[in-house]
Image (spheres, helix red, strand yellow):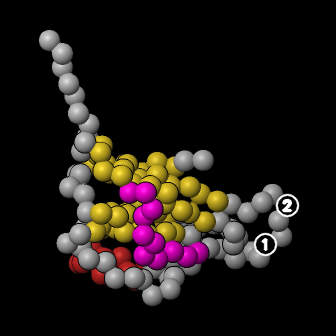
Amino acid sequence: MIALVLAVAMQTANPRIVDQGARGSIQTRRDVVVRTQAEWDALMPSLRGDQPKAVDFSKEMIVGVFLGSRPTPGYGVTIVSADEENGVLHVKYRETAPQPGMIAAQVITYPYQVVAIPKSAAKDVKFEKVE
C-alpha cells in the first residue's frame, strides 16, 4: 500500500511592513504575535516609527521582532518570510549590524519591525534568525 502524506503550506512571499524603526521602547529582545485589535492597541505605544498602517484583523495578523537595546545606530531587523507548515507558523528574520570600524554615534537604539501577514490559525509560532 502506498501512503500519501500531504503537507499543507501557506507562504507569505513579502510580508507587508506595518511599522519599523530604531527607536522603539521595548528594551529587551522580544518576538510578538498580534491577532486582535486589542492586542495591537496594547503594543502600539511601544512603536516609534512612522504612523503604523491599518490592519484588518479579519484577514491579517501581525508578527514582529524587537531586538532590544543596541549601543549605536546601524542595527536593524527585517522579517523576510512567514510560512505555515503542518500547523506551525515559521517566521524568518534577518538582523543587520554596523560595519566593523564604522564611526557611529554612541546612542542606544531599540530596532524593531512589525509586519502584517495573512491570518493564520497556527497556535505554534517559531521565530528563526537567518543569514
Q: Residue at x 27, y 48 (%)?
A: 124
Q: Nearer the viewer, residue 60 or 31?
A: 60
Disc 1: which residue: 104
Q: Amino acid at mark 1?
A: Ala
Q: Which mark is residue 101?
A: 2
Q: Residue at x 50, y 86 (%)?
A: 50
Horizontally, residue 70 falls left or right of residue 51, namely right
Q: Position of residue 69 (x, y in %)?
A: 58, 67
Q: Position of residue 58 (x, y in %)?
A: 19, 72
Q: Nearer the viewer, residue 15 or 32?
A: 15
The residues colored magenta run: 12-22
Marks 1 & 2, CB-CB < 8 Å contact: no
Horizontally, residue 124 falls left or right of residue 101, namely left
Q: Position of residue 9 (x, y in %)?
A: 29, 45
Q: Which mark is residue 47?
A: none
Q: Nearer the viewer, residue 42 or 129?
A: 129
Residue 61 appears in the picture as rendered: yes
Query: Is-magenta flag for residue 74?
Result: no
Q: Quadrant of residue 59?
A: bottom left
Q: Residue at x 85, y 61 (%)?
A: 101
